[in-house]
Image (spheres, helix red, strand yellow):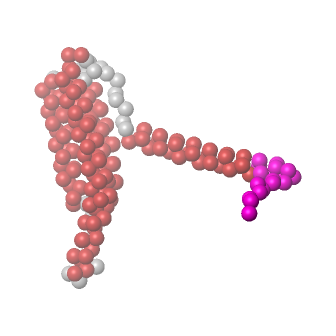
Amino acid sequence: MARTAAVRDPRYRPFRVAVLTVYLVVVSVFCILVTASVARSVAAMSPRREPVRTATLTPDACVDRASALLDEMESRRRALTGIAPASRADTSWMSFRVEWLERLRQAESSCGVGAPERRELADLFRQLEHLEDLYTTSAVQYSGEIGPALDRFRRMVARARGGP
């Protein structure tokens, strides 16, 4: 049995064109809105670098500031395991991350990391930002993978003890 191609009635062509046009407009508007939302979110989560100015801090003070920023980030990472529910740890980390990045940008500006004679400090701050990226990945993985299992375990312990 041979299949015959369905013949489209020419009377309905304007309606088919109208439906296709409406569909393309709706999909295009949706895609534009999603793209704009993602762009706004990324911009809000990534503080801009301040303009390069002359260094106001000594290299030793800059190293101390970078060490203090790392210590702060490390203590916050350790505190993630105490957040309940654990599956929400990434939300806490993301709000901390933006504030921390703003302090990092201020430290970079105060240390004049754009100056050629401060190349070593620029590398130090670049490595610190790379560590922050890795810590963010770890926090998201903890929240998404370990967090739900940990929350389930805590609920099971509470039920076994007769609690809520």
Residue 137 vs 84, above or below: the answer is above
Most distant residue in the top direction: 116
How many numbered dots are placed on residues in this image?
0
- Could you tell me residue 17's position as x and y percent? 77, 47
Instruction: Give the quadrant of residue 160.
Output: bottom left
Q: What stretch is highlighted in magenta?
A: 1-18
Judge from the rendering whether residue 141 lies leftward or rightward of residue 72; answer left or right. Answer: right
- Residue 3 belongs to magenta span: yes
Question: Is residue 85 in view?
Answer: no
Q: Which residue lies furthest to the bottom in this view?
A: 162
129 part of magenta stretch: no
| Residue sitting at x 22%, y 33% | 127
Can you say which quadrant of the picture contains the N terminus? Answer: bottom right
Answer with the quarter of the image where residue 65 lies.
top left
Q: Which residue is drawn at 77% across and 49% down?
A: 18
Seen at 26% across and 37% down, the residue is 130
Placement of the C terminus among the 4 image quadrants: bottom left
Image coordinates for residue 103, horizontal then vertical, percent: 27, 36
Residue 82 pos. (x, y %): 21, 60
Q: In this view, does 2 lie to the left or right of 54?
A: right
Q: In this view, does 95 lie above or below 143?
A: above
Residue 149: x and y in percent read 27, 66
Q: Residue at x 62, y 44 (%)?
A: 28
Q: Can residue 23 be seen in this view?
A: yes
Q: Is residue 58 above or below residue 135?
A: above
Name the residue at the right extreme.
11
- Residue that lies at the very extreme toward the front in this rendered image: 1
